[in-house]
Each structure stands twice: as C-alpha cells, then as structure tokens.
Image: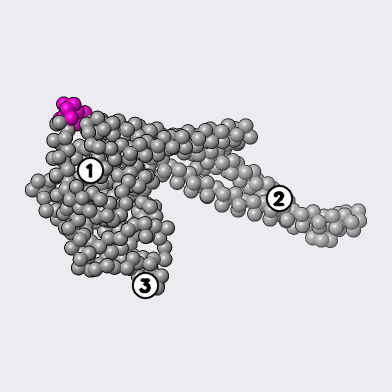
Amino acid sequence: MLFSSLPFLTIAQGEVDDLQIQKDEKRRQLLEIKNKITALQSTITNQRNKIASLNNEIELYDLQISQTEQQIEAINTEVEFINLEVVDTLKQIGTAETDIKTKRELLTDLIREIYVFDQASPLEVLLSGSDFSHFLNVVQDTLSFQETNQELLDGLNSLKEELVKKNLALDEQRAELQKLKLQVEETQSGLVLQLEQKEFLLNVTRGQESRYQNLLVEVSGEEAKIQREIFDLDLSIRQQLGDKTVPSITEGLATPMDGILTQGYGNTGFTSLGYSFHNGIDIAAPPGTPVRAAGDGVVYAVGTGETAYGNWVVIRHTVQTKDNGMRNIFTLYAHLSKIHVNSGVGVLQGDIIGSEGNTGNTTRLLYGPERGYHLHFTIFDEEGFGIKEGAYQDIYGAYQIPYGYTYNPFDFFE
C-alpha cells in the first residue's frame, strides 16, 4: 500500500482547527497579493498609454519590477498553502490507515467468533442452553455478528477508496509544487532581466531625453518592418480566401492565460508601426505566468527567434462543428519566455505549454503600448495556414512567422 511506511497519525480536533486557520490565512494573503498584482497591471497599462518619454519608460520598468516582485511573493505564498495541504493530506492518510488497521483487527476477531459458532450444530447449540429462548438468542447473535461483519467490510472498502483518493491528491499536490518551483525560478529570472534592462536603458540614454527619443525612433522603425511583414502575410491569405464564416464549434476554447487584455483583435489603430490590423489578442501578466493550451490538440510546431513572435507554440485542434462536421484550427501562443512542449506532443485543454515573457519584438528595450511582458494569442483557419522563414534574417538572425486567415479569439471562448 502506498505510504505504508508512514507512521500512523491521529488528528486531534485542535490540530485540525489550527491547520485550517493556517490555510485560511494563506488564502487571505494570496488574495491580497493577487489584488495588488491586478492593480499594478492596470497602472502599467495606463502608463503605457502615456506619451513616450524617458521618465515614463523608467516608471514603467519600476512598475513592472514591483509587479514581478509581488508575483514571486504570490507564488511563494501558494507554495506555503500547498505545503499545508500536503500536511493535511498526510494526516488524513495516516488516520485512514489507522482506521483500516483497527477495522481489520475487529473483522478478524468477528470472523474467528463466527467460525466457532459455525462449528457447532444446531442440536449442540440447543442442548448447551437451558431453554429454546437461549437457542434463539444464540442464532440472533450469530446473525448480528454477520451483519456487523458486513458493516466492517463495507467500511473497509470505503476507507480503501478514500485512501486511494488521498494518495492521488497527494501526488497532484506534489506535482503542483514542482510546477510552482519552476514558475518561481522563471519569474526570478524575469526580475533579474528587468533590472538589467532598466540599467542598460539608463546607460544607453545617459539619462537624457533626447537620446531616449532617438532610441525610440530606431526601435519603432525596426519593429514596424517586422509587423508589416506579419501583416502582409496574413493580408495576402485573407485576399485569396475572401471573408470566411467563423466555425460554429460544439465546445469552446478556454482563455490561455490569466491577466489583463491590453490589445484586442482587428483594427486597433497601430498604424504608426506599419499596420492597422491586429491578428490576435494581447494579454498582460507578470513574467513567468503559465500559458495553457486553449483546447485539446497536438503541438504542430514551435519556434524561437530574436524578433517577430520570439518564442512561440502552434497547436492544431480538430474540433467538431454544430452541423456534425469536423474542422481544424490552429492557435498561436507568442512571446513566451519558456516553451514547455515539443512538436508532435498531444495536449489537453489547460495543460501548461509555456510561460509568458517578452521575447521577439517586445525585447527592443522599450515597453510602450505594444511591447513588454504579454502573451500574443491568435487563432488561424486551417485553410491558408503556413509557417514562413522571416525576411530579415540577415539583420535579426533566424526566425519564422506563422501566418494565415485569422479569427477573433473571443468568438471561440466559452
């Protein structure tokens, strides 16, 4: 039996109450921290909408750094909460094992007594007593033993099922701790990177607004070329295919990451960057926030690069339409700090496929309204979908661009 080497644990009521108080306190702390993170994200979003200046950019770095620090605290608090859950589960496992041992001993004694009764014939039982009433009492006692025996047996089966569930819960809790350990490591790496980038920006500009404005022009010009490349690839497919009807699927997709929507789908007005149509949605959150598969599917491709979508994952989903047909769609998850899946791997809705980051175009020193830590999420139709080698590899190194006919993700979310 799993964890049979653990000592038997009994839980006093005071001990249970104390553990519950600790868990409730951790929940309260976690809620407070998450509220701070959400408030900071709103402030960051507002700050990005201000006129670009060196002071505003430094303020953005400071806000993002504060949010990342809060995220680290949130993860550590969640780790502490799950550790309390582990202690609680271990105690319950110990109690269940103790109950099983006790009931098994009682059952053994009952079986032994029933066996003794079964060895005597009804005549022997009748003759051993003073009257017929004694005989009926003995028979009734035997039946009561058998009923108690069945109750103990049913109780043992229930305890066994409970123990299996508790062991499964323990395995899940330990797996979650491993995921959180990875997340806090990535978030801490993001914090170090933010501090380095802020210092680098101050060194490059030497604290002078004119140098910052020159850098802003250079960065925006570089990004405009890449964004125009992406826009033109999608536009060419849209022109070939015309207007397509949004697939009416039976089961919707899930939002791939918790956070704040910072840019929607469609004509969002970023013409200064060389395009007017945003082919997906942007969701902002602290560095290292888990990015999850929007639906069941197979990882179609993964890519990395210093520009465009940076580190990205594409998943192919075979979905059922409401007219009982089947349709393939592709989902793109871009600007990841880490990729946790490989091509060809099957994923279920909610599986972690990577961590939110700011790779690709977003790494060009400046945050601005279209840069910084966020997830870019796009949904492509199967028809016209492709992955192309980037046109500026001599400047930015190797990179690829997934492209095709896109849909508004909000038309697919449940």
Residue receiving disc 1: 362
Q: Kindly report which numbered mark, 3 or 2, lies closer to the viewer in this rendering.
A: 3
Which kind of residue does numbered mark 1 sit on?
Thr
Q: Marks 3/1: CA distance?
A: 39 Å
The reply to whether the C-beta atoms of the residues labelled 3 and 2 are less than 8 Å apart is no
Q: Kindly report which numbered mark, 3 or 1, lies closer to the viewer in this rendering.
A: 1
The residue under the point 39% across, 55% down is 254
Q: Which mark is residue 325?
A: 3
Which kind of residue does numbered mark 3 sit on?
Gly
Residue receiving disc 2: 110
Question: Which mark sits nearer the N-terminus, 3 or 2?
Answer: 2
The one nearer the camera, 307 or 141, is 307
The residue under the point 82% across, 61% down is 122
The one nearer the camera, 52 or 134, is 52
Q: Marks 3/2: CA distance?
A: 61 Å
**Location of residue 54 (image quadrant):** top left
- Say few, some or many: other residues with alpha carbon within 10 Å of mark 1 (under 14 / 14 to 19 / 20 or more): many
